Image (spheres, rainbow, N blue to C red):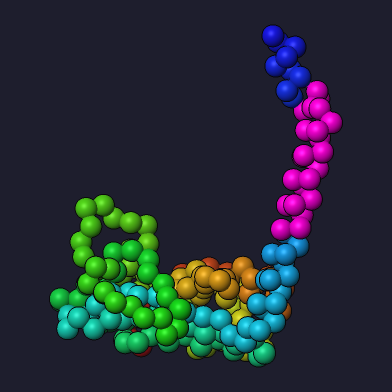
């Protein structure tokens, strides 16, 4: 009985089992090649990347978004807010209860469900700290902070901060952008946005 069980292992695989395994590997290799080809074709036809994140509703139930767009040719990064983020700190405003990101132009049917109170908090909910983080990223972009930009082009690290905070993509995603677009480097691209300035958290612009 023990011998029969052992014969089912890799060392005692039959010729048919080995051929099946080799066939499976060939199929996986071809699937990978096909995926890479589709990816490459998509990226050749992509001129810009970006999206928006729903942050909450104002006291008058107006949706507030943070959004960005990065162009392929010049790597121009544009970060915008639909409103001054301070509107979400006012009485009656409601913050998003989770992370909700969308493509530019994507239709959104129901905002109120995204701000209703939940019994259990989720990891992607918007907080005042989230608003401060987004404000800081916008300031870094506007000032072309030296650790985040080279000749007015964002480094891959800074692009990652922005994408992770607002929109990571869908069919085309941030990983594909990181892979196929040529980002400049400062030589040491890592930096911590929270310590970029001493007092950048007023949410005033």
Q: Residue at coordinates 42% horizontally, 75% vertically from top-left? A: 102
- The answer, for residue 25, to whether it is visible in the render is yes
As drawn, is 184 to the left or to the right of 68?
A: right
Q: Quadrant of residue 54?
A: bottom left
The x, y position of residue 121, in whole percent, is 29, 55
Per the image, is 129 magenta?
Answer: no
- In the figure, is residue 174 to the left or right of 102? right
The quarter of the rendered structure image containing the N terminus is top right
Q: How many marks?
A: 0
Q: Position of residue 185 (x, y in %)?
A: 70, 76
As drawn, the residue found furthest toward the top would be: 1
* Picture residue at 63% right of the left edge, 83% below the top: 46
Quadrant for the C terminus, please: bottom left
Front residue of this view, candidates 39 and 200 = 39
Q: Is residue 26 left or right of residue 152?
A: right
**Is residue 66 depicted above or below 165 in this figure?**
below
Q: Which residues are magenta?
A: 10-31
Does the magenta run of residues contain 16? yes
Q: Residue at x 33, y 56 (%)?
A: 122
- Residue shown at the point (31%, 87%) measured from the top left: 83
Q: Position of residue 86 (x, y in %)?
A: 28, 81
Q: Is residue 136 visible?
A: no
Most extreme residue toward the front, as rendered?
A: 16
Query: Chief secondary structure of the magenta span?
Result: helix
**Location of residue 74 (image quadrant):** bottom right
Question: For residue 53, which quarter of the picture?
Answer: bottom left
């Amino acid at each position: 009985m023990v011998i029969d069980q052992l014969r089912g292992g890799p060392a005692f695989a039959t010729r048919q089992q080995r051929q099946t395994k080799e066939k499976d590997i060939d199929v996986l290799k071809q699937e990978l090649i096909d995926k890479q080809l589709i990816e490459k074709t998509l990226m050749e036809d992509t001129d810009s990347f970006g999206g928006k994140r729903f942050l909450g509703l104002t006291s008058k139930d107006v949706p507030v978004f943070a959004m960005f767009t990065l162009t392929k040719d010049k790597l121009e990064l544009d970060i915008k807010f639909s409103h001054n983020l301070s509107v979400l700190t006012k009485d009656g405003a409601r913050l998003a209860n989770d992370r909700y990101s969308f493509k530019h132009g994507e239709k959104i049917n129901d905002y109120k469900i995204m701000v209703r109170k939940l019994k259990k908090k989720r990891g992607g909910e918007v907080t005042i700290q989230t608003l401060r983080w987004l404000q800081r990223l916008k300031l870094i972009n506007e000032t072309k902070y030296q650790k985040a930009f080279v000749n007015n082009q964002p480094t891959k690290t800074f692009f990652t901060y922005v994408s992770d905070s607002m929109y990571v993509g869908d069919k085309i995603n941030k990983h594909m952008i990181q892979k196929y677009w040529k980002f400049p480097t400062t030589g040491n691209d890592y930096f911590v946005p929270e310590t970029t300035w001493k007092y950048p958290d007023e949410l005033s612009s």
